[in-house]
Image (cartoon, rainbow, N blue to C red):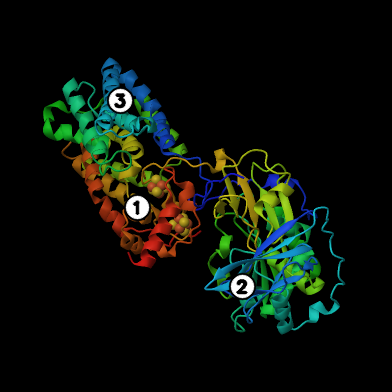
């Protein structure tokens, strides 16, 4: 038994096929939220015909980010009555059937990008609708503009400990210089001193690539660090001790989006998504417009080979299982997976044999077994005594448990029980 | 598209299972069983069949009576039967064997809710019960008597290696147990029979102490458990035969498990 878990990586299948930008996306459906709770107003009307990259919604006030359409087509507002008012909940953009989404003409590279002051950079982030491409999906300008001096380091998180998922890796391998330039922009926008790239030790080539690019650019504020490819290292910015202090942790794909926004004036309307899993005919990474449905994303990979047991948005450890293919790709979606029964099928739950596997696996040193045994009996007070609130919901305890107990569900139940005071 | 399962994350699970745990541990006992059959002959064969068969039979019956689903296939009861056969004297009369099996399987295991729920080691409890209630019937089992004979000793070590390879137990727990046990035996005058003590210590550490169900829930806790159990076994060994001493010491420590669990919580001393 050891204190850390290296998951089987299963990444080769999605790396076999190259990164591609499909031009046949017919429909996107974009929910009107940006970050948390910010009110959004449509900037288009029913029936408008728009270009790719057109602004379709703006936030109320300074906090949110505007939304842009990833495809050209005709707009339809989906509305719903709320407290007597009509509120727009989604904007749909549909392209005509024979229409091909040609790549827009490449705009001219901004010449003065390297000299722009930090205020300007932040306002570009806001105007171009940049969101962080991790689970938070928050407006980038909000994260970057902490009061000065709080952010000393920009940590570019290149870790993908979840099996199957390779979207960050593919992006960094395909566009290393752009990602580095993007990271430099983030550094200047945050007025930070240093940039640290974190790469998993299992990705040796990527690490060497980034290191050599840093060397070529002669940026001595940059540094590449290897971290062990141990789950949950790097998921949701869970990083070893020192790194997360006084730093902003951002994904490589966020840096790339910042590069495109500043150098190419490009709004944020698409991201790289891994479409994979054993059931997908041609697993690969795709540039997908935000708002494309999971069903369409799978179709772009030649559809399904066989019926999956689960459709998952995100990685197999932390992702969310979908009841159908109607869910959409959002800023924080790094993967869409279709997993077969033998991998994601449910197994019967057995009683706990107190084997300590979960205790040894927990990255934040809790006793998942004590927490869940108490939660099973609805003794949430006891769960709390065992510090359930510190759980980062990484799911490792569920993963290692030989009895297949639904640890995470029980933990969620305990947390909810504590919150509602029952 | 049809509706898919929306069960909560994680969506993948390790290949480990409860059944694998118990069957693999039973399999690791194979060398010991073979050696003891070779030494103990027909008497031990009879004991093995009675104990293992009796355990399975009792579980099946008691599950049948309480209308619960049988758990025979997970191997837990089978392992209890094997262990019990190894720690009972091979010539114990039939009724006594059945009583021990009954205590182990029905009283300790089933009445507390089956696999994972009992609070003392079932096989050890069976043996100790017999010891306490019918002292005449209990003697040393062939395994403990002959632990110093080379084939048996070698078999014990082989079984231990098999089990160690399954990586189910903390290495240092075994180390602590064996060291303290031997130290105690040596200091209390067991120097002449040190090979026997070594055999007993290794067998006990690997196959009696390490029932996960009745061990503490942290690494430190498990180590404390082993240290104290070894110490008690050494002290009790002054008055009792080895088998009685180790059984009592483990039972005593079983009582302390809730207390250890409460005191020794997972800490942040381990680095990632
Ligand atoms: S891993 Fe599962 S069986 Fe083992 S102690 Fe934890 S909850 Fe119990
Ligand atoms: S889900 Fe929570 S309790 Fe379980 S291993 Fe992760 S942090 Fe620990």
Is A255 on the left-hand or right-hand side of B81? right
What residue is shown with label 1?
A376
Is A12 on the left-hand or right-hand side of B230? right
Name of the residue lying farthest toward the top? B42
Q: At which x and y percent is residue A232? A: 55, 57
Q: Determine whether the residue tagged by mark 2 lies in a helix, strand or loop.
A: strand
Seen from the viewer's position, the closer of residues B203 and A415 is: A415
Q: Determine whether the residue tagged by mark 1 lies in a helix, strand or loop.
A: helix
Judge if badges 1 and 3 mark residues of a common chain.
Answer: no
Q: At which x and y percent is residue A58? A: 68, 76
Circle count: 3
Residue drawn where x is 33% and y is 29% of the image: B78
Numbered label attached to residue B52: 3
Picture quadrant where residue B139 is located: top left
Which chain does the numbered disc 1 sit on? A
Picture quadrant where residue B127 is located: top left
What residue is shown with label 2?
A248
Which chain does the numbered disc 2 sit on? A
Which mark is in front, 1 or 3? 1
Q: At which x and y percent is residue A182? A: 74, 70
């Amino acid at each position: 038994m050891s204190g850390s878990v290296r998951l089987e990586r299963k990444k080769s299948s999605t790396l076999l096929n190259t990164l591609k930008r499909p031009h046949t996306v017919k429909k996107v459906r974009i929910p009107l939220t940006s970050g948390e709770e910010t009110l959004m107003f449509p900037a288009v009307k029913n029936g408008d015909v728009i270009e790719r990259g057109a602004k379709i919604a703006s936030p109320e006030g300074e906090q949110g980010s505007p939304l842009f359409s990833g495809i050209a087509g005709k707009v339809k507002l989906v509305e719903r009555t709320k407290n007597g008012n009509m509120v727009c909940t989604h904007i749909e953009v549909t392209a005509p059937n024979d229409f091909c989404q040609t790549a827009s003409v490449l705009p001219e590279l901004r010449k003065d990008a390297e000299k722009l002051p930090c205020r300007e950079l932040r306002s570009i982030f806001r105007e171009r609708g940049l969101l962080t491409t991790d689970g938070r999906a928050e407006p980038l300008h909000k994260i970057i503009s902490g009061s000065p001096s709080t952010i000393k380091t920009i940590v570019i998180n290149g870790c993908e400990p979840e099996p199957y998922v390779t979207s960050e890796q593919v992006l960094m391998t395909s566009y290393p210089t752009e990602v580095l330039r993007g990271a430099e922009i983030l550094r200047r926008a945050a007025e930070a001193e240093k940039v640290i790239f974190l790469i998993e030790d299992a990705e040796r080539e990527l690490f060497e690539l980034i290191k050599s690019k840093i060397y070529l650019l002669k940026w001595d504020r940059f540094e590449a660090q290897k971290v062990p490819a141990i789950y949950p290292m790097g998921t949701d910015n869970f990083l070893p001790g020192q790194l997360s202090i006084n730093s902003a942790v951002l994904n490589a794909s966020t840096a790339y989006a910042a590069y495109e926004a500043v150098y190419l004036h490009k709004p944020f309307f698409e991201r790289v998504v891994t479409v994979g899993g054993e059931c997908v005919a041609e697993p690969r990474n795709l540039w997908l417009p935000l708002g494309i449905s999971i069903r369409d994303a799978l179709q772009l990979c030649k559809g399904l080979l066989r019926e999956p047991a689960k459709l998952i948005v995100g990685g197999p450890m932390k992702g969310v299982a979908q009841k159908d293919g109607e869910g959409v790709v959002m800023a924080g979606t790094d993967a869409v997976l279709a997993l077969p029964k033998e991998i994601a099928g449910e197994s019967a739950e057995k009683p706990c044999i107190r084997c300590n596997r979960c205790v040894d696996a927990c990255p934040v040193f809790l006793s998942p077994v004590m927490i869940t045994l108490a939660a099973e009996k609805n003794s949430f007070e006891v769960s709390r005594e065992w510090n359930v609130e510190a759980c980062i919901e990484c799911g490792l305890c569920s993963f290692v448990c030989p009895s297949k107990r639904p640890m995470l569900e029980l933990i969620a139940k305990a947390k909810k029980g504590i919150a509602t005071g029952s | 598209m049809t509706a898919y399962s929306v069960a909560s994350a994680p969506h993948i699970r390790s290949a480990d299972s409860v059944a694998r745990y118990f069957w693999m541990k039973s399999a690791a006992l194979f060398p010991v069983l073979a050696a003891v059959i070779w030494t103990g002959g027909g008497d031990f064969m009879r004991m093995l069949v009675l104990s293992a068969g009796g355990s399975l039979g009792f579980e099946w019956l008691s599950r049948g009576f309480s209308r619960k689903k049988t758990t025979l296939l997970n191997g837990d009861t089978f392992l209890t039967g094997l262990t019990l056969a190894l720690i009972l004297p091979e010539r114990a009369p039939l009724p006594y064997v059945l009583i021990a099996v009954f205590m182990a399987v029905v009283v300790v295991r089933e009445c507390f809710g089956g696999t994972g729920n009992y609070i003392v080691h079932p096989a050890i409890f069976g043996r100790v019960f017999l010891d306490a209630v019918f002292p005449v019937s209990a003697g040393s089992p062939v395994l403990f008597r002959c632990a110093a004979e080379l084939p048996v000793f070698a078999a014990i070590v082989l079984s231990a290696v098999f089990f160690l390879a399954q990586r189910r137990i903390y290495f240092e727990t075994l180390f602590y147990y064996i060291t303290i046990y031997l130290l105690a035996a040596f200091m209390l005058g067991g120097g002449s029979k040190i090979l026997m003590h070594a055999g007993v210590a290794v067998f006990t550490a690997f196959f009696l102490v390490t029932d996960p169900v009745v061990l503490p829930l942290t690494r430190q806790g498990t180590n404390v458990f082993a240290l104290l159990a070894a110490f008690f076994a050494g002290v009790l060994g002054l008055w009792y035969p080895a088998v009685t001493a180790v059984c009592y010491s483990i039972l005593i420590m079983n009582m302390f498990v809730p207390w250890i669990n409460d005191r020794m919580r997972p800490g942040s001393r381990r680095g990632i």
